[in-house]
Amino acid sequence: MFRKCIAFLAILACIACGKEKEGNLKITGNIDGLKEGTLFLQKIQDTSLVTLDSVVIKGDANFAFSTSIEEPQVLYLYLDKKDYNDLNDRIDFFAEPGEMTIHTTLRRFVNDVKITGSESNNDLDAFKDFMTKFNTKELMLIREGLDAQKEEDTKKLTEINTQINNYAKTRMRYILNYAFTNKENIIVPYVVAKEANDANVKFLDTIYKQLPPKVADSKYGKELKELIEKRKVEEQQ
């Protein structure tokens, strides 16, 4: 009887280890056009990128990852094509426990990506799309400013600089308004810390204090709190 119990417990232990190895996040996908390369699933830990899983692609462009995450967080899909060029080879996305799919192309690895299985990532994509409009307009104004500088058109350069400053303020107001009106969203502290870290610390503090406990105690909620505390110390010096 004792031996049977030991054997039964050993089986249970193997099953538990297998489940732990499988992880609570499964990511599958395809990179159209990729014949050979290595894919890495990564996250930022202590300001450094660490690899959670990897897969070598040889002929079959399908891939599958399995890992564990404690809560929704930003992960990265990095493609090493052995071309010694990291440009446009890394996709960032908001992962959630469960099953996700990522499909993209080799030619436009970042721009063609389609991700399903994470509502948080859908929200992040929508936010990114809106921010892209701001960034594109800002780049256009900067180019116009450079042209005016080359032409030594002081009046036009002053007007463009004013437009850039006003546009930067509009961009910041959008980010802060997004945070105030979407406080239940887990991505809020992440986008605020990333896109509005130089905003008035009083605004940042107000945003943090109105976050619900679940969001405030999340990975990025804690990072936003650390940012605010650091900013307060810096302003007192």
Image (spheres, rainbow, N blue to C red):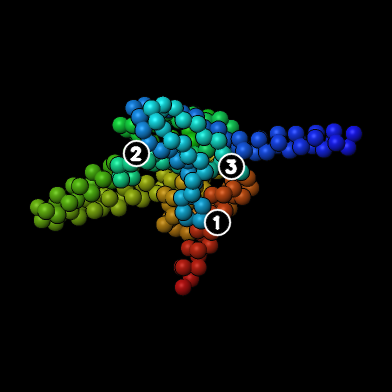
Give the amino acid type for the residue marked by disc 1 in the picture.
Lys
For the residues bearing labels 3 and 1, Cβ distance under 8 angstroms: no
Residue 222 rendering spot, x and y as whole percentages: 57, 53
Residue 94 rendering spot, x and y as whole percentages: 50, 39
Residue 115 rendering spot, x and y as whole percentages: 46, 30
User: For mark 1, what is the residue?
Assistant: 225
Asked if residue 14 lies left or right of residue 22, the reply is right
Residue 138 rendering spot, x and y as whole percentages: 28, 46
Counting residues from the start of the chain, the first of labels 3 and 1 encountered is: 3
Query: Relative to the observer, which residue lies in front, 185 or 160?
Result: 185
Alpha-carbon neighbours of circle 2 within 10 Å: few (<14), some, or many (≥20)? some
Residue sitting at x 34%, y 39%: 81
Q: CA distance from mark 3 to mark 1?
A: 21 Å
Residue 103 falls in image quadrant: top left
Q: Image quadrant for the N terminus?
A: top right
Mark 3 or 2, closer to the camera: 2
User: For mark 3, what is the residue?
Assistant: 69
Disc marking residue 81: 2
